[in-house]
Image (cartoon, rainbow, N blue to C red):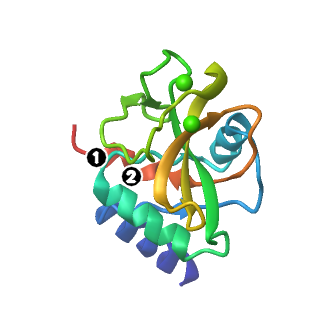
Amino acid sequence: MRVSIVLLLFIAQVVIGVKRYFIPNLKANWYKASEFCNSQDMALASVESVEKHQSLVKFIESTDKFSNASRFWLGGSDLAEEGTFVWAPTGRLVTFAAWAENEPNNVNGTENCIEIIHNTYVNIRWQWNDHDCRGFTTYFVCESVADRCIEPF
Ligand SMILES: [Ca+2]
Ligand SMILES: [Ca+2]
């Protein structure tokens, strides 16, 4: 009985295309964050549309990691080519973007990974920043990859 309920829930999520998000109870740099998501058969979250941005924000706000000064790694970077941001888990170009004012600014030439920030003290509300992939440690958002196979091309 329990197995069939779990199976039904899984099928329902896949059919209606609901992304399953997960914020581990762990702060890490971008590389370790990516590895951790992969180890859970997930990937750092990609945000390809305003709808996904909204559902991600809604999810984060429902978790205990949400505060007035929140920041989370996402799956985007310009590691391969400076200035060209790509969602690493899918290889797709970042087209929809929600950069904060004057971002991405590649400070010291070392900011290559995308984080999402909600900080009411500096009036940044769910906007993106490029940050130091290796040197900066924070929470991160993993997402399920199971429903990618039914995304339209
Ligand atoms: Ca950069
Ligand atoms: Ca920056």
Secondary element type, mark 2: helix
Amino acid type at circle 2 is Asp
| Residue shown at the point (30%, 63%) measured from the top left | 15
Residue 121 location (% of width, % of height): 60, 66
Q: Residue furthest left?
A: 153
- How far apart, in angstroms, are the residues tagged by discs 2 and 1? 7 Å
* Front residue of this view, candidates 118 and 17: 118
Mark 2 Cα-neighbour bin, 10 Å: few <14, some 14–19, many ≥20? some
Confirm or deny contact between disc 2 and disc 1 (CB under 8 A). yes
Q: Quadrant of residue 32?
A: top right
**Secondary structure of residue under mark 1:** loop
Residue situated in front as seen by the camera: 53 or 69: 69
Q: Residues within 10 Å of mark 1 (few under 14, many from 20)?
A: few
Residue 34 image point, x, y percent: 64, 39
Q: Amino acid at mark 1?
A: Glu
Residue drawn at the location 59% of the way across and 61% of the way down: 22
In the picture of the structure, the residue carrying the numbered disc 2 is 147
Where ligand 2 lies, by image quadrant? top right
> Measuring 54% from the left and 68% from the top, which residue is drawn there?
60
| Side (left or right) of 16 relative to 148 | left
In the picture as drawn, the residue positioned furthest to the top comes out as 81
Q: Position of residue 98 (x, y in %)?
A: 38, 48
The correct choice, above or below, for 116 with respect to 23 in the image is above
Numbered badge on residue 151:
1
Using the image, determine if residue 15 lies above or below residue 128: below
Query: Is ligand 1 closer than 8 angstroms to the Cβ of mark 1?
Result: no
